[in-house]
């Protein structure tokens, strides 16, 4: 018989490990591609790149919006 408690424990452990890996990989990508202009903390740099941290535009719904920008770039005004 399967023990639901054990299964749940392993599922949560796996999910947390996966989330940690995603966060780690995201941080590596951000530092490699974005941080130079947007700053390590996402505060932006005047005349160079806008604020990302806490930005409504960044936090808006849109699947893979930021990933597409990293992969394909972005030109023009961000509205």
Image: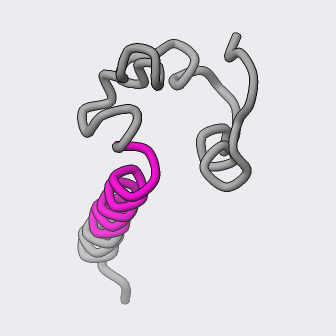
At a point 40% along the width and 56% down the height, the residue shown is 26
| Residue 36 place in picture, x, y as percent | 35, 43
At a point 41% along the width and 19% down the height, the residue shown is 51
Residue 15 visible within the image? no
| Residue 33 place in picture, x, y as percent | 46, 53
Vertical relation: 62 (above or below) 76: below
At a point 69% along the width and 44% down the height, the residue shown is 73
Chain part drawn in magenta: 15-35
Magenta-drawn stretch, dominant element (helix, strand or loop): helix
41 relative to 59 in the view: left or right: left
Q: Is residue 70 covered in magenta?
A: no
Q: Nearer the viewer, residue 39 or 68?
A: 39
Q: Quadrant of the C terminus?
A: top right
72 relative to 44 in the view: left or right: right
Q: Quadrant of residue 8?
A: bottom left
Q: Quadrant of residue 21?
A: bottom left
| Residue 31 place in picture, x, y as percent | 33, 53
1 relative to 60 in the view: left or right: left
Q: Is residue 21 covered in magenta?
A: yes
């Amino acid at each position: 018989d399967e023990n639901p408690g054990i299964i749940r424990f392993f599922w949560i452990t796996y999910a947390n490990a996966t989330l940690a890996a995603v966060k780690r990989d995201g941080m590596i990508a951000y530092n490699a591609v974005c941080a130079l202009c947007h700053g390590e903390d996402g505060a932006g740099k005047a005349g160079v790149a806008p604020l990302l941290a806490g930005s409504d535009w960044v936090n808006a719904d849109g699947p893979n919006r930021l990933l597409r920008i990293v992969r394909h770039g972005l030109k023009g005004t961000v509205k």
